[in-house]
Image: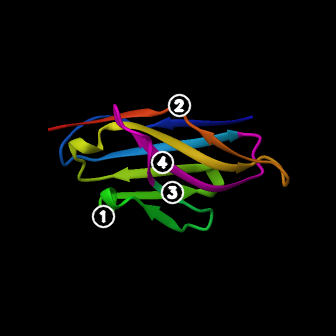
Amino acid sequence: QVQLVESGGGLVQTGGSLRLSCAASGSIFFINAMGWYRQAPGKQRELVADITSGGSTNYDDSVKGRFTISRDNAKNTVYLQMNSLKPEDTAVYYCYADVRRTIWSRGDYWGQGTQVTVSS
């Protein structure tokens, strides 16, 4: 089994910053991509940012220049530094990981979600 545990969400004022962390543990042979999605009330889950094992990153246009994704492969951990937060960033943020448990098996795993609320 693979578990993803998130931390770092909370309440912040407009213009503030938060840093999310997500640590993967369990039966892990290798982790390909890791990333963050978010889901606001009444909306579909959307990709915020992801990062490959080699460090290549991808961002949604709405967060470019404000959010930075990074990862520590030795710790199987991905981070999301969120600066200049806006009320529209309010959502539940979910971590995900594309994990190889063995050379032959691969699956997507999700964290439980962490609430980020930006007050105006």
Q: Residue at x 39, y 58 (%)?
A: 60
Q: Quadrant of the N terminus?
A: top right
Magenta stretch containing residue 28, yes or no?
yes
Display coloring? rainbow
Q: Amino acid at mark 3?
A: Asp
| Residue pointed to by mark 4 | 36
Q: Is residue 8 visible?
A: no
Dot placed on the residue nearer the N-terminal end, 3 or 2: 3
Give the structural element (helix, strand or loop) at label 3: strand
Q: Amino acid at mark 1?
A: Gly
Q: Residue at x 54, y 60 (%)?
A: 51
Q: Quadrant of the C terminus?
A: top left
The answer to which image quadrant residue 27 occupies is top right
Q: Is residue 26 visible?
A: yes
Region in magenta: 26-48
Q: Which mark is residue 8?
A: none
Q: Nearer the viewer, residue 67 or 77?
A: 67
37 horizontally vs 119: left or right: right
Q: Is the C-beta separation of discs 4 and 1 under 8 Å?
A: no
Dot placed on the residue nearer the N-terminal end, 4 or 1: 4
64 horizontally vs 106: left or right: left
* Residue 5 x %, y %: 56, 35
| Residue pointed to by mark 3 | 50
Q: CA distance from mark 2 to mark 1?
A: 27 Å
Dot placed on the residue nearer the N-terminal end, 2 or 1: 1
Give the structural element (helix, strand or loop) at label 2: loop
Dot placed on the residue nearer the N-terminal end, 4 or 3: 4
Q: Residue at x 53, y 31 (%)?
A: 112
